[in-house]
Amino acid sequence: MKSAEGFFYAIVSDMNEKSKNIVLTGFRAVGKSSVGKMLAQKIRYTFIDTDTLLCERLGASIADIVTRHGWAFFREAERALLAEVPGMERVVLATGGGAIEHQEEWHRLRSCCYVVWLDADVATIRQRMGGDPHSVEQRPSLTGNSARDEIEMLLSRRIPLYSAGSDLQLDTVGKEPAALVESIVEHVRIVEPETAQG
């Protein structure tokens, strides 16, 4: 008899082309990295945080990259990284909050990835960002507005993109990462047989 871990691994190993990778999207501070690491460990995939990988490749923090080269430079590097995703396999990818705005690359990404949108309301996002001492240092303002105004403005622009560009939406408010991981695994198990029949 297979162990629970072996059972989940067998399910994920049999994923079709669309779900050979799992991508987590959503605004800052919704738990993409925490959930992604836990999910990757559970299903024995490789975890990649796009912001961390970009910083490693560019040899600087996001704040330093933006100070030296501007947001446009960082977004172009982010776009180029997303273009690599169709060539990846067995990866859980936590993307930056603005990655969804690279619509051409996102459309291609969706052909080989199961996309999960981790959602939270403005108040929760502000609270979580305020509790992270590195948040401002690592992620400078995009607009120069107050934190609340910037979150509301960016969410109004991105929510339609998150919604249209995802296979699953999960509300993260009041939920532990482990519970969100279980929800993702359960939804993947439901979706795959239906996809295989189609």
Image (cartoon, grey):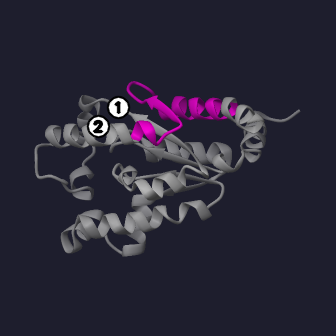
SS assignment at label 1: loop
Residue type at mark 2 is Arg
Locate the N terminus and report the quarter of the image it occupies: top right
- Bin the neighbour count of mark 2 within 10 Å (Cα to Cα): few under 14, some 14-19, many 20 and up: some
Vertical placement of residue 19 versus 177, above or below? below
* Residue 125 on the magenta span: no
Is residue 190 shown above or below 35?
Answer: above
Query: Which residue is identified by label 1?
Result: 120
Nearer to us in this view, 114 or 24: 114
Image mark count? 2
What span is in magenta? Answer: 162-189
Residue furthest left in the image:
145
Asked which quadrant contains residue 8, the reply is top right
Residue 128, numbered circle: 2
Q: Which of 185 and 133 is in front in this view?
A: 185
Q: Quick check: 37 above or below 86?
A: above
User: From the viewer's perspective, is the residue at label 2 or at label 1 nearer?
Assistant: 1
Q: Distance between the residues labelled 2 and 1?
A: 10 Å
